[in-house]
Amino acid sequence: MSMTGKLTTMAAVGFVMIAAPVTAQEADNITVGYEEEGRYYTEDGVPTYNITAEGEVDWLTYSGFRRYHSECHVCHGPEGEGSSYAPALKKSALDMDYYDFVDVVVNGRQKVSAAENSVMPAFGTNVNVMCYLDDIYTYLKARGTDAVPRGRPPKKEAKSDAIRVAEEACLGG
Amino acid sequence: MTRLLLLTTAFTLGGAMAAQANADLQTLMDDPNQWVIQTGDYANQRYSDLEQINKDNVGSLQVAWSFSTGVLRGHEGSPLVVGDVMYVHTPFPNIVYALDLNNDGKVLWKYEPKQDPSVIPVMCCDTVNRGVAYADGKIFLHQADTTLVALDAKTGAVVWSVKNGDPSKGETNTATVMPVKDKVIVGISGGEFGVRGSVTAYNTADGSVAWRAYSMGPDSDTLMDGENTTHLGKPVGADSGLATWEGDQWQIGGGTTWGWYSYDPDLNLMYYGTGNPSTWNPSQRPGDNAWSMTIFARDVDTGMAKWVYQMTPHDEWDFDGINEMILTDQNIGGADRKLLTHFDRNGLGYTLDRETGELLVAEKFDPAVNWTTGVDMDPNSATYGRPAVVAQYSTEQNGEDVNSTGICPAALGSKDQQPAAYSPKTELFYVPTNHVCMDYEPFRVSYTAGQPYVGATLSMYPAPDSHGGMGNFIAWDGKEGSIKWSLPEQFSVWSGALATAGDVVFYGTLEGYLKAVDANTGEELYKFKTPSGIIGNVMTYSNGGKQYVAVLSGVGGWAGIGLAAGLTNPTDGLGAVGGYAALSDYTALGGTLTVFTLPN
């Protein structure tokens, strides 16, 4: 389903059923509300991707492609598709609230039972992940809606000075 | 040095008993009815003298019995057979079953260690384990959390247990162990976590450390001697494990040791390879990064290195050098030589003299390999033994934040750990290979203990302008360095091969087929689809006068992660996305042992 199609459906449902906050939230979770020096956010201040009519992705989404394939890919498979070992994160980025997503990355979680041995490590002390958390999150959200296809995004917005400064500060020089 | 002196004393005392234990193990290995260590024998030939199943009757092979391991993750390695008992291991949680071959595989005992599950995510690329080994009445299990445990082979009771590494620093284990004389020799994983690789010999009797040899560091750590340890015939010089590193980067230098080990009893030397240097971003670690990516020959009594050969100095592609070293005695150039053949991740098949470390052959075993034009074979050249790197595919020369495209092979190598077989009858090696290429973009990363330390973005896809599949199963002449025949496979071949005196070669595929082919021609003689994809190794044994062939299925490992959703080729443009086969369309998780035999 295309992004536009999905959004239209959500908006329609939201309009009729005012008592369905989850659905409304999901719609809000993708649409760009505002931009701040090269970073894009929903109305609620949650990071999201931005793709121009020419197919140019925002810097964070592009950066997320790179960081995902360095830090996450060895367990979760290429392009957020999932593997025999770990779930498809392109779905998790849509199914999970942003703050829950961040919580799992920072603190990890375990699903260990007779049938399952699934353990997500805590990345809270790993600057290679933490400094790029929003990048990875927006990339996966773009994969989840199919706004970005598999493979390397061919066109990208330039890296803003604000993003560059924040990255250097985060990595500790 | 103090440690070494103490160890030498300990060895002298235990010497007589050790010789006896080793002779017993050698006798068991020489008996083709049994399969007592993962590699079949010390030479790692994966060849069996059994010939009841042969190329004329293998077509009527059928399933004799099967056994579910109860574990879902990737199943590498194979069962063992010692006498009338089969020993089957699993991935994490690393269960070991002893099955009674005289009673339809009834479970004699089961051992399940208690391990902290936090080790799971520190194991790059699935929680595989490549199996147990037998020696001296004990079954040796090297667990994911690096606990080495000796179990009483009759009862499964723990005889002793020792911890080889620290998983909180990313030190884990996936490999089997090699029992030799009075020692059991183990390696370590964690190259993607900045672990410094080492090989450790434990005394079989009580689990005390005999020696430990690191892949890099000062001579006292690497157990190298500047004058007597050689690289291509020349002394390596003092502290050669420090000389090609900047500052203290060697301390997180990688060079882990998770492959299969071999041993030559006459030379008293063991052979193994070391993995990639950490990180995957080459610009962050200037120098040759010795001795990562290196073939080591070490004295098993002392651990001292006799010779080394670094195949890929200053790795730029994650071409770990850990693949098995297969020992053969062959006539090459009119002379009988003691040879070592190694199919490296970097796509080159090497043949060396295993006594001296002299390089005899280095040729591509997949025509797709393009990162190098070949190895300098001129002993008088300043670059003797070094691969000539093609600038276009050099991730170092292209630099950080540049995407180098079309590199063949991909990081998983033209061949990964899945071991090849050798038949002395045909003098051919039978090699499971990957036919996959990649784009590779390195960038700067910071090191945090116990956290991944990767530093590159990879995209992988089937080798372009070829048959479209991701693997080949090839027959290789190690004396000439040439491919004799090559069978295209839809997926990477991630299963260890078996060659037999019946002129049959067996291997498994990721879709789950066990295949039997003619050792001379490669003609397919038999196939059977097991319950899940095969990343285990094929083995054979006989019981009650009947020959059996056994293999573990249970998809996973690197293959399960990389290929589950299928690969894409970004350079093909958007239209081709999803155009390649996804493994998940063919198979699902689940560990099963399947045992084959001929009908009565």
Image: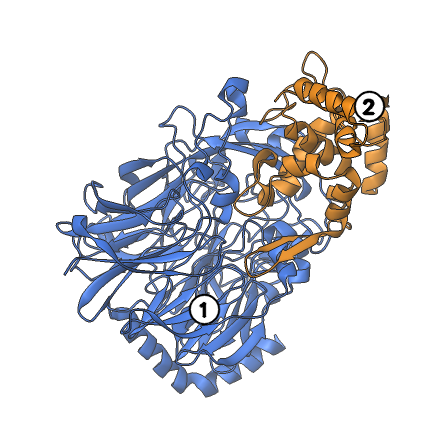
Choose top left, top right, bottom left or bottom right for residue B268: bottom left
Secondary structure beneath dot 2 equals loop
Which quadrant would the N terminus of chain A be assigned to in this image? top right
Q: Residues within 10 Å of mark 1 (few under 14, many from 20)?
A: many
Q: Position of residue B284 (x, y in %)?
A: 68, 42
Give the colouring mode of the picture: by chain
Secondary structure beneath dot 1 equals strand
Q: Position of residue A48 (x, y in %)?
A: 77, 28
Q: Nearer the observer, disc 2 or disc 1?
A: 1
**Residue name at image x 85 percent, y 34 percent:** A166
Confirm whether residue B443 shows in the render: no
Q: Is residue B559 above or below residue B468?
A: below
Report the amino acid beneath label 2.
Answer: Gly
In the image, the chain rendered in blue is B
Q: Is residue B145 above or below residue A39?
A: below
Chain of the residue on which disc 2 is drawn: A
Chain of the residue on which disc 1 is drawn: B
Task: Describe residue B489's horizontal placement relative to residue B574 as left or right.
Answer: left
In the image, the chain rendered in orange is A
**Residue name at image x 51 percent, y 49 percent:** B293
State the residue position of label 1: B96
Q: Are marks 2 and 1 in contact (CB under 8 Å)?
A: no
Q: Position of residue B272 (x, y in %)?
A: 45, 58
Which quadrant would the C terminus of chain A be assigned to in this image? top right
**Residue name at image x 61 percent, y 31 percent:** B397
Q: Is residue A48 above or below residue A84?
A: above
Q: Nearer the viewer, residue B547 or B356?
A: B547
Q: Nearer the viewer, residue B112 or B371?
A: B112
